Amino acid sequence: MQNGEVIIDESGAVLKNWAIKLEWMPESFRQFYDKIYQDLNAMARQAINAFRWRQNVSGNHQPFSFVSFQWSSDASDWAPMPSDTRTSVWVLKGFDISASGLTQLVEIFGSGKIEPFAHELIREARSLLLSAPRSALLIAIASLETGLKAYLNDLIPNSDVLLNRMQSPPILTLIQEVIPELCKIRQRPSEYFPFNKENKDYLKKWVRQRNDVAHGKNVRLDSEKLDGFIMFSADFLYLLDYHMGCAWAREFLVTDHFKIG
């Protein structure tokens, strides 16, 4: 019963046009549901993708979005499959045009600073989160690599001349080994370098998925979890800004991965 109305009668029939919650179903059915849904989804996407490739059809990376998932015992009367409902809400933040906000604008312009390219990349990754999640992941990792190169150049001025001409060490090698050692030599703060085990394992998981995508594996990405990684990456970039002298950057560390005292 839901909102005073019977959804499933005594015979087990579901009221027409109603779908029951997937969480009400036994575990065996949920596993069956996941398998059927993924198989049908993959088959439909492969067919549409092959067709538009053959005809050079224009369109978004994602050929279609979810419309419905229904079942029937006679191919005549169709009923909605049990389902879960998930909602994502993004809170947008506008410009602060108060006196203090305009003062910040004057200060940043007066210092000659512009938004670092790494931050541009992470914004681009977020804009692709729903329409092209694999591209979003590739760009998010690229933003970390770009941010780390900028930080290394801050630690060792003009090192970008060398970094731009050679293959960079893996991200985790930079974070866990190279940067802590350089911070010690340069007597610079090294808060969060190296990463603790939790952050290291978290980043390693996403780097591995990036590598799978880059090597041509058909990786399925959960947009909600990927959004969490993009937030992690944005936080990390602000952490680098903080270590490069932007004291104000600490107020934008919003995830539980990075908190400065």
Image (cartoon, rainbow, N blue to C red):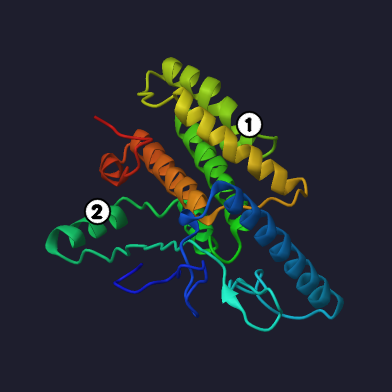
Residue situated in front as seen by the camera: 177 or 116: 177
Amino acid type shown at disc 1: Pro
| Vertical placement of residue 258 versus 226, above or below | above
On the question of residue 45 being in view, the answer is yes
| Vertical placement of residue 127 versus 198, above or below | below
254 lies left or right of 59 = left
Tell me the CA gap for discs 2 and 1.
Answer: 35 Å
Q: Residue at horizontal 48%, vertical 20%?
A: 182
Q: Where is residue 121 in the image (x, y as percent from the top left)?
A: 52, 55
| Vertical placement of residue 248 versus 190, above or below | below
Q: Earlier in the sequence, mark 2 or mark 1?
A: 2
Quarter occupied by residue 131: bottom right
Residue situated in front as seen by the camera: 72 or 141: 72
Q: Residue at horizontal 70%, vertical 48%?
A: 213
Q: Where is residue 184 in the image (x, y as percent from the top left)?
A: 42, 16
Q: Nearer the viewer, mark 2 or mark 1?
A: 1
Residue at the bottom extreme of this rendering: 76
- Quadrant (top left/top right/bottom left/bottom right) for the N terminus: bottom left
Tell me, for residue 170, which label it has, or none: 1
Residue situated in front as seen by the camera: 29 or 59: 29
Mark 2 burial class by Cα count in 10 Å: few <14, some 14-19, many 20+: few
Q: Position of residue 64 (x, y in %)?
A: 64, 74
Mark 1 burial class by Cα count in 10 Å: few <14, some 14-19, many 20+: few
Label 2 sits on a secondary structure element that is helix
Residue marked by disc 2:
107
Amino acid type shown at disc 2: Glu
128 lies left or right of 193 = right
Q: Residue at horizontal 64%, vertical 42%?
A: 209
